[in-house]
Structures are given as C-alpha cells and as structure tokens.
Image (cartoon, rainbow, N blue to C red):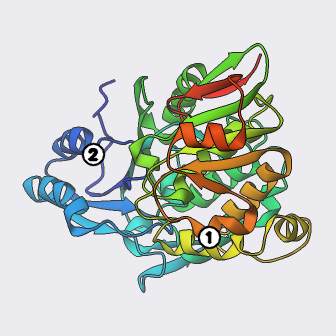
Amino acid sequence: MSEFDFPSGQHVVVVIPDLTRPFDSELWLPAILQALAGRRVEVVVALGLHRRLTFAELAPIQSICEEHRAALRQHDPDGAELRQTSVQPPGWFANDLVEADLIVCAGVVEPHQYAGYSGGIKGLSIGCAGRQTINWMHGLEFLRESTTGVGKLEGNRFQQSLWELASVFDQVWGFFVVPSGGVYSGPVHAAFDAATQDAAARHFFEIAQPVEWLRLVVPPTKATNFYQASRAATYAALVDRPALVPQGWLLVEAACPEGIGEGSGERAFAVAMQRGVDVLLDEMQGTHAIGGGEQRAYVLATVLRSFRMAVITDADLSELEAVGISTFSSFEEAKATLGLSNAGLVVENPFHQVPRLR
C-alpha cells in the first residue's frame, strides 16, 4: 500500500504537529494534500496548550494549503466551537473534528515521557483537545502510575486513555515519520504499532557503566524554550536503568530564546516551579489539582530528587533558581564551576538517542 492511499471520505481534517516536533511539514504536507485532491480538506495545527505559531512560522504551511485549496487553522483549546463528547475520560473537541468523515493524523513517533512514544493518536487526543481534557490527561494520577514512562507501552494507562478519547471519531488514518527511520501510513493503530517498533530499535542506546554527567545537546525543535528542552533531562533520568550515577549531573544544552516558554502551559509550569522541589514532591502524593503544563514541574521535581541539573544557555532562566537549577554560558564553564571529572558522556540528540545501562 502506498503511503498516500487514504480511504474514502469527502470531509477530511489533516492534523499536523506544531514546531516542537521534528515533522517536516514542507516535505510531507504537499504530498498528503495532493493525495486528498478533490475533497473538502482542513489542516489543523495541533497546539495543545503550546503557544500559537507566529505569522512567519505559519506562512509556509499557509502557502501549501492555499496551493492545494485546503483551509487552515491553529487549534484553540478554549475555542467556542468545542463540544463535550460522550466518552470517558471527558473529551472536548471541535465540531469539525467530530463531524469529519476522515481524520489524517500526521506526526513523528519518538520517545515520550508519559505516552511511551509521541505521535500516534496523541496529536489528536491531546494536541486538538479542549483545555478541560488536556488538564485531566496531565493530572497527578497518571504521573504516579508506574506504567507510564519513556518507551513504555504495555499497560500504559495514559496511552490507553488517548485511544479511548479518540473512539468518538469515525475514521482516523495515521501518517507517521520515525526520525532516522521509516514512514508508516494506514489505520492509525496499525501505523502507530509499526512506527513504535521502529523507534524502539533506533532511539535508545546502552552503555556498560553509569557516568558522572550527561551533556544533553538539545536539537533546535526542542531548544526554543526550557519547557521543551527540560524533557532531555527527564527522559535520561527516568528511563528504565538510567545511565547516570546517583546525584550525577544532567547538563541540558539549549538556546531557549523564549526563556521558560510563552504558551499557557509553559507559564503554568514556571509558576509551579516557584513552589520548590520539596513542596512539589509532597503535592504529588496527594490530591492537588493541576492544570496542563504544571505536570512538567512535578516530573522535574522527581528528577531532582535523584540527580542534579544545570542548563547551558545564554537565556535568562531565573525562574529555575527556586528548584536549584543553575545556568552556565558554556559547557567548559559548567564543568569548571561544578568540578566535573572527565567521566561523562555527550549525547548529541537526547530525544532520539536516549542512554541507559545495559
């Protein structure tokens, strides 16, 4: 079957990720839209609670959509057109998604902190959901679950809930790219299963002995703000069999031109961090209600219970002082100030090369 043999359906919604995912929209979107020629097509940029794309960032996608006569919109988690669907967990989605004959969910499949692997149905169930749904999916209940984690799929309740949310949609087709790997298209579940097998074989590597520090060089797609860049540390620290000695150093190298981040989720994360590690860890054991974005503060607090962390950047990340994370302008400065030995490891892309012990 061709990558672009999409099933029938006149009203089609194509869901694509925002710029925090390494999906090459300028390469893949024209081919997808060409294969859907003659149908009524809308392209939705799945933002979740991330910030909206700027005019300049959106312009290439807008040009592609105009050329192929497709409508384009960015997802609004608080949009007036959202309606509650009859599923549990509670699903809030836009009318055009619920009423579509076919949804093409496009994206990348790579390791993810909660879902095991990003991509799949997550771009729809989270990226295109209402704020109520996103907040529910990022509650403390899932963070406490041992089945959620980087590269974990079996029994993963977070992943299962994503599929339950998507059960209201009539027909969903997956189009998934595995970085440095293959392209998988087909019914969304089958395409995701094939892609995760590929990603599992490519995106982890093993070392024989734990090291004293990891220098995690964040790629541009995740280096725009600390909210995204911090995932490099949490993936390396919370993977099964982490490659770091207890209280070893996680050195996140990222430009972070947007600082902590500009979206509502990123700002909620920044506010939560001001409560400090001990308070966050205490709250994580209780029934404290949290909103989308805050969950990253709890995950980071969990990491800081076992390891130490610093950021290599020129950005102002003063919000991190409350949790004891320092910043340095270069790796050499960090190494000298922290008194690090040479017993470390440089990881050039910590999202697609997650280290762990053999």
Q: Is residue 38 above or below residue 154?
A: below
Crowding around mark 2 (Cα neighbors within 10 Å: few <14, some 14 to 19, many 20+) is: some
In percent of width and height, residue 32 lies at 24, 42
Residue 185 lies left or right of residue 114; in this view the side is left
In which quadrant of the rendered image does the C terminus lie?
top right
| Residue 193 or residue 346, whichever sits in front | 346
Report how far apart the C-alphas of labels 1 and 2 lie in the structure. Answer: 33 Å
| Residue 232 or residue 97, whichever sits in front | 232
Q: Which residue ends up furthest to the left in the rendered image? A: 67
In percent of width and height, residue 310 lies at 65, 49
- The numbered dot on residue 25 is 2
Residue 250 lies left or right of residue 3; in this view the side is right
Q: How many marks?
A: 2
Residue 124 lies left or right of residue 321; in this view the side is left
> Element at badge 1?
helix
Q: Which residue is mark 1?
A: 319
In which quadrant of the rendered image does the N terminus lie?
top left
Q: Amino acid at mark 2?
A: Ser
Residue 88 visible, this orientation = no
Q: Amino acid at mark 1?
A: Glu
Q: Which residue ends up furthest to the bottom in the rendered image? A: 80
> Element at badge 2?
helix
Q: Is residue 171 above or below residue 267?
A: above
